[in-house]
Amino acid sequence: MSEKALHGGHRERVRERFLSGDAASRSEAALLELLLTYAIPQRDVQPLANNLLSRFGSLDKVLAAQPADLCQVAGIKQNSATLLNLVAAIHKRNSSSAPATAHGPTPKSGHAGRPPEQRVLTQLLESPTAAKPQPPLPRHRKPASRYGSGLFGKAVLKEAIDMLPKLPDSDSLDDTRAFLRSNLHFSAEQTRQRCAAYITRRMFPEGIADAPLRHFARAFPASTELRDVCYYRFCKAEPLMPAVISNVLLPALGLGRMRRERIAQYLQHKFPESKAVSDCVTAIVEVLVAGGIASADRKQITFAARPIRNASFAFILHSEFPEPGMYEVGKAETNPLLSSLLWTPERILAALYELRNVGLISKISEIDSIRQFTLKFDLAGLVSHLARGAKTP
């Protein structure tokens, strides 16, 4: 299958999921990916959407960014930047010209609770099929996007890793939150409620307690593999983490250590008006330690390029490349979320060969400058295979 046909099929599936009302298609990353498909033809734009969210922090900040800043991101040209700004401009115009109703408050819509730019982007993308009835979403599917400045003050990753293997066999976030509120170790009920919300939003960012993660956690409790996967989900939900890894830790990977204040300096530069930087530094270090990415004392963080475990690498690979098919090796080697685990490109290439050797992917080929790997499972199929006893280190 040609790369053009592969990408074309993926784009069609992205559009079909959106038009079907799939809750996952309303996440910030999915909306931005779909928008970029209209600006950049014949290219996989999912990594680009993730890079934009990682750099700017949220969808509304991407749409409101200056064209010059957008064009500094590899893959964004003037046309793409103009389209992104156009969405924000349309929203601004609609907001300023919308007439006030004399009949009380506007009824709530399916877009309520989202940032303004995300609401208008969803409305713009839906408008060509506005007359087509959409199936209602299950009530438990409530995609939880990352709003606010992008800073976070609580990690709670260690607790997430401990709790995931014990979660009830339900995809309902209400059931999951209720279980966490009853079983987290904190004494104060308010703290348990707050931490349950943190865990569900970060571990299940699409608004459903998905079976692949729950089943993986049961198959690999208290393991490095589970720590890898939970850390990955955290990074996916909190774009500041991969940004810190990319801009602060990776440049110091050769040295293998740095002072904690280096993270503080980066955050102060990125958020000069924020008073929450100190709490965020503490939370970031807690995430790095809980995820097994680094060790730390009061002043210093120590880290190194990490070995790759088959099971966690396979789970994360199939999460980033969610459909069976052929993909470029380079897209795995340069994926910012894979890099956030301190997995180097050369180790990623070796790990792809190992997955092929144990039968978790179909094949990997390197012919001249063309390097590709082929996936045979979706994420649910992979986890089912792992749970039945696939080979792991």
Image: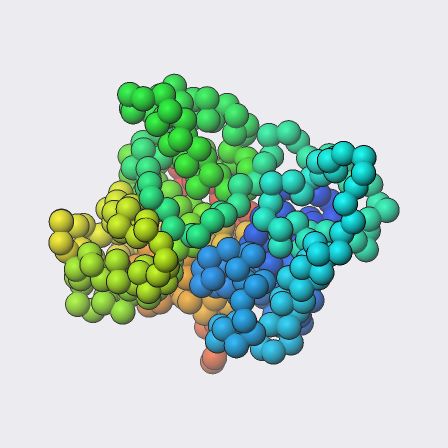
Question: Please, is residue 370 above or below residue 259 in the view?
Answer: below
Out of 62 and 308, give the one closest to the viewer. Answer: 62
Can residue 40 be seen here? Answer: no
Q: Taking 132 as reference, is 243 left or right?
A: left
Out of 266 and 52, give the one closest to the viewer. Answer: 266
Kindly identify the residue that appears in the image at 74 percent across and 48 percent down.
Answer: 19
Out of 316 and 246, give the one closest to the viewer. Answer: 246
Q: Position of residue 116 (x, y in %)?
A: 62, 51
Q: Taking 72 as reference, is 81 left or right?
A: right
| Residue farthest to the right, as pictured | 131
Q: Position of residue 174 (x, y in %)?
A: 52, 25
Q: Position of residue 98 (x, y in %)?
A: 76, 52
Question: Please, is residue 119 above or below residue 369 in the view?
Answer: above
| Residue farthest to the bottom, as pictured | 368
**Number of numbered callouts drawn:** 0
Q: Taking 345 as reference, is 90 left or right?
A: right
Q: Position of residue 341 (x, y in %)?
A: 33, 55
Kindly identify the residue that appears in the image at 81 percent across and 38 percent down.
Answer: 102
Out of 375 and 188, give the one closest to the viewer. Answer: 188
- Image quadrant for the N terminus? bottom right
**Display colour scheme:** rainbow
Q: Quadrant of residue 101?
A: top right
Kindly identify the residue that appears in the image at 55 percent across and 47 percent down.
Answer: 378
Kindly identify the residue that appears in the image at 36 percent across and 58 percent down.
Answer: 273
Can residue 207 be seen here? Answer: yes
